[in-house]
Amino acid sequence: MSEQVTETPHTTVIERRSGGGAAIFIGIVLLIAVAVGAFYLFNKSQNDNARTDAIAGAAKDVGDSAKKVGDSASKAADDATK
């Protein structure tokens, strides 16, 4: 009696995708960087607007004061000539 055992060879392929977690991590880091940059630019813009408004207000006050001084000088000159 003869026994014949035939084994068929088979190959198992295991694919591993490395870097999937790293890609997600890099994406999250980039998203955070963009959010921080946008926040910084938004605040800088608001600070510039506040500074511009403050300068404009100060210039208006100086202009109003100069007008009052001019009016006073004109009134004093008118009083001196009477």
Image (cartoon, rainbow, N blue to C red):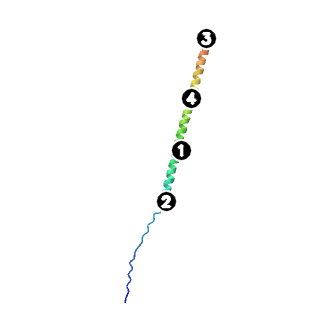
- Of labels 3 and 2, the one closer to you: 2
Relative horizontal placement of residue 56, taking residue 13 as reference (left or right): right
Residue type at mark 1?
Tyr
How far is disc 4 from disc 3 in space, using C-alphas? Answer: 33 Å
- Of labels 4 and 3, the one closer to you: 4
| First reached walking from the N terminus: tag 3 or tag 2 | 2
Marks 4 and 3 in Cβ contact (< 8 Å): no
Vertical comparison of 2 with 70: above or below: below
Vertical comparison of 50 with 82: above or below: below
Marks 3 and 2 in Cβ contact (< 8 Å): no
Q: How many residues crowd mark 1 within 10 Å: few (<14), some (14–19), many (20+)?
A: few
| First reached walking from the N terminus: tag 1 or tag 2 | 2
Residue 53: % across, % down: 54, 33
| First reached walking from the N terminus: tag 1 or tag 3 | 1
- Of labels 1 and 4, the one closer to you: 1
Describe the element under mark 2 as helix, strand or loop.
Answer: helix
Q: Quadrant of residue 6?
A: bottom left
Relative horizontal placement of residue 2, taking residue 31 as reference (left or right): left
Q: How many residues crowd mark 4 within 10 Å: few (<14), some (14–19), many (20+)?
A: few
Residue at numbered disc 2: 21
Describe the element under mark 1 as helix, strand or loop.
Answer: helix
| First reached walking from the N terminus: tag 4 or tag 3 | 4
Residue type at mark 4?
Ala
Residue type at mark 2?
Gly
| First reached walking from the N terminus: tag 4 or tag 2 | 2
Residue 7: % across, % down: 39, 79
Residue 67: % across, % down: 57, 22
- Of labels 1 and 3, the one closer to you: 1
Residue at numbered disc 1: 40
Residue at numbered disc 3: 81
How far is disc 4 from disc 2 in space, using C-alphas? Answer: 57 Å
Mark sitting on residue 59? 4
